[in-house]
Amino acid sequence: MLRRLESSSSPSLRLPLSLLTTLLLGCGLALSAQAADACPQRGDLAPMYCDADGDLVADAPTDESQYLDPDPLVFAYTPVEDPAIYADIWEPFIEHLRDVTGKDVRFYAVQSNAAEIEAMRSGRIQVAGFSTGPTPFAVNLAGAVPFAIMGSDDGEFGYTLQVYTRKDSGIDELSDLKGKRVAHTSPTSNSGNLAPRALFPKQGITPDEDYEVVYSGSHDQSMLGVVAGDYDAAPVASEVVDRMAERGLYDPEEVKIVFESKRFPTTSYTYAYNLKPELIDKIKEAFFSFDMNGTELGEEFDGVTKFVPVTYQKDWEVIRDIQDANGVVYSQENVE
C-alpha cells in the first residue's frame, strides 16, 4: 500500500515514505487509544479484559463472534496430592455435567495453581475450581468468573485457617513458633500463606522475621511434613486436613491445633468469561441441580450437600482485603 501511494502520478499523493509511515503509525495509535477507551474501567483485570459494570470480573465479549462453545468441555479441580483419586471422586458430577450440557466433559488434572490459571487463560480449560487464595489471580489474569461454592442445605459455607504441630513439639501457641521452621503452602494460598502473613502479626508473631518460612507446595505436603517432623508447624486449610484424616493419610492423635481463624470461603467454581451465554446457563444449571448426597463427592467433602451461588465481589472481599494487606499484585510473576 505504501509503494502504491508513493508512486501515484497524482501530485497530491506524492508524499515521502517516512511521512506516510508516520501518518499511518499515528492512525494505528489513535485506533489503539480508541480501543482502550472503549473499556471505561477494568480495575485489577489484565488489559485483555474489561469490567464496564464494575462487578470486578471480566465482562463477556461485546462481539458475539468471540463467544466460545467448546466440545469437549474441560473441567479442572484445584491441585491436590493425588489427582487420580479426585478424578474418580468428581466422576458423578462430570457425568451430570455431560447430561445437562450435552457436551463431552473431561477432567483435567493440574499440578499447580499457576498451571491451572494459565490453562484457563489460554482456553485449555473452561470450567474450574480454584482454591481460595488463587481465585483473585484466576479472575484477574485468566477471566475466570466465580459463581458457585460447596455449601450445606442452609447455604452456609467456608473453612478456617488452622496451625498444626506435633503434640510432642513443645509448641503450644503461636508465640512458640519463634525460631522455628514453618511450612507455608504457596505464595498465592490464602490460609497457607497470605492469611498468616496478615493475621499472625496481630498475635505477636511475624512470618519470615520470627520464624523461617518454607514453601511446601500444597496443604497436603505441609501436613505430611509436620507429621514426619520435617516442619515444626504449618498453617493449613481445615477442610483439606479433615479430608486427609478421613482418608487415613495421617494420625490425628499425633498432632494438635495451636491457632484457628474465623471462616473463609472455600474453593470457587468458575467458568471462562467468554463462553457462549447459553452454555454458561447450562453449566450453572448442572452445578445447582447436582445433589451430592450419596455420591463420592458428598462423602469426600464432609458437611456439604450442594453447590450454592456466590459472587466474587461480595464473597471474596475478605480475601481481597487479606491480599491487599500483603501488598499482593495480581501478576503472572506473583502466581509463580
Image: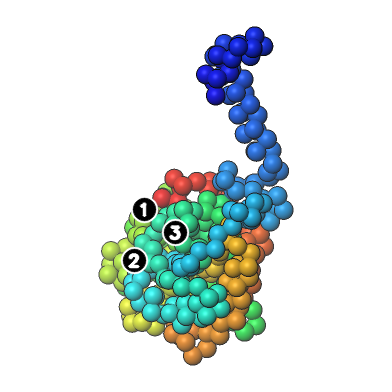
The image shows residue 130 at horizontal and vertical percentages of 49, 64
**Which numbered disc flags the more N-terminal residue, 2 or 3?**
3
- From this view, report whether residue 320 is shown above or below residue 130: above
Q: Going by the image, does 241 lie left or right of 42?
A: left
Q: Residues within 10 Å of mark 3 (few under 14, many from 20)?
A: some
User: Can you name the residue that lies furthest to the top here?
Assistant: 11
In the rendered structure, which amino acid carries the disc numbered 2? Answer: Gln
Residue of label 1: 212
Which residue is more in the foreground, 58 or 204?
A: 58
The image shows residue 285 at horizontal and vertical percentages of 61, 76
Which residue is more in the foreground, 55 or 164?
A: 55
Q: Which mark is residue 295?
A: none
Query: In the rendered image, which quarter contains the N terminus?
Result: top right
The image shows residue 233 at horizontal and vertical percentages of 37, 65
Residue at the image point whose x is 28% and y is 67% from the top:
229
Which residue is more in the foreground, 328 or 148?
A: 148
Q: Secondary structure at mark 2?
A: helix
The answer to whether the residues at label 3 and label 1 have Cβ atoms under 8 Å apart is no
Q: Which mark is residue 124?
A: 3
In the rendered structure, which amino acid carries the disc numbered 1? Answer: Glu
